[in-house]
Image: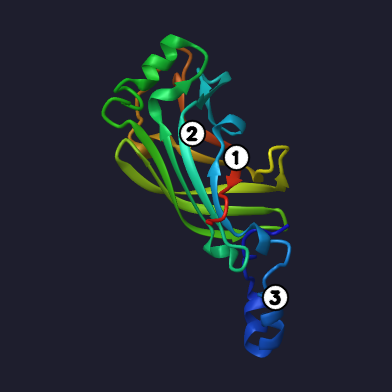
Amino acid sequence: MALFNRKRTADTADTAVTAPAATAAVLEPDPVLVPLTGDYTIDPAHSSIGFTVRHAMVTNVRGSFGAYEGTLHLDGTDPSRSTASLDVEIASVDTGIADRDGHLRSADFFDAESFPLMTFRSTAAESVSRDRCSITGDLTLRDVTKPLTIDLKFHGAATDVYGAERVGFEGSAEILRSDWGLTWNAALETGGVMVSDKVKLTFDISAVKAAPEA
């Protein structure tokens, strides 16, 4: 199920010039997607936002954020106009070790007291394959804003046992934390550093459709 408009190749661009009727057929709204149109709220009880970072050059440390709010707007008629917004509370970082979490909240890393939120605001969306898409936007962390593209897999839509209409996505992106000012590190006697610059962000999202206004 393609949620976002498929990326145009050179061949399809040529077709747009020589055969406009065929192009119109390609852009016709997908009847399966049209009913998904609407506003959705991310459900934190059935979602997760996490990260993985290399530690001491030999293993991975995983963490997550426990408090966040987010919304989606899905446009089934023109899926490229779909949008996403996310606000994450930095102080909710959790790696399972209290001392490490305290260090992450400190000025060495996130500086949660000065910069309490990490935010994402989408600017574009497109299809990569039938059930995979990407969403690009602005990620703001420590008051630094840079573009980020998240690769997503669309898991589909369903109505749960309480009658709520849901959609599900799973995705990831890799960043260099130094691009956002997270530069703390320590050299190892054996070579290398304590914490890798590369960080993998992970998203497992369940979102609930807003009820239509009366």
Say which of marks 1 and 3 sits in front.
1
Q: What residue type is labelled 1?
A: Ile
Q: Which of disc 1 and disc 2 is earlier in sequence?
A: 2
Question: For mark 3, does the 10 Å Cα neighbourhood hold few (<14), some (14 to 19), or many (20 or more) residues?
Answer: few
As drawn, the residue found furthest toward the front would be 214
Disc 2 to disc 1, C-alpha distance:
23 Å
Q: Is mark 1 on a helix, strand or loop?
A: strand
Q: Is mark 2 on a helix, strand or loop?
A: strand
The quarter holding residue 119 reads top left
Percent position (x, y) of residue 133?
Answer: 63, 54
Disc 1 to disc 3, C-alpha distance:
29 Å
Question: For mark 2, does the 10 Å Cα neighbourhood hold few (<14), some (14 to 19), or many (20 or more) residues?
Answer: some
Q: Name the residue under label 3.
A: 26
Q: Which of disc 3 and disc 1 is earlier in sequence?
A: 3
Q: Mark 2 points at which residue?
A: 198
Tally the numbered discs: 3
Q: Is mark 3 on a helix, strand or loop?
A: helix
Q: Which amino acid does label 2 sit on?
A: Lys
Disc 3 to disc 2, C-alpha distance:
39 Å
Is residue 93 shown above or below 102?
below
Residue 141 appears in the picture as rendered: yes
Percent position (x, y) of residue 123?
Answer: 45, 57
As drawn, the residue found furthest toward the left would be 114
Is residue 189 shown above or below 129?
above
**Residue at image point 71% right, 40% down:** 160
Residue 186 appears in the picture as rendered: no
Q: Which of disc 2 and disc 3 is earlier in sequence?
A: 3
Quarter in which the N terminus is drawn: bottom right
Residue 205 tag number:
1
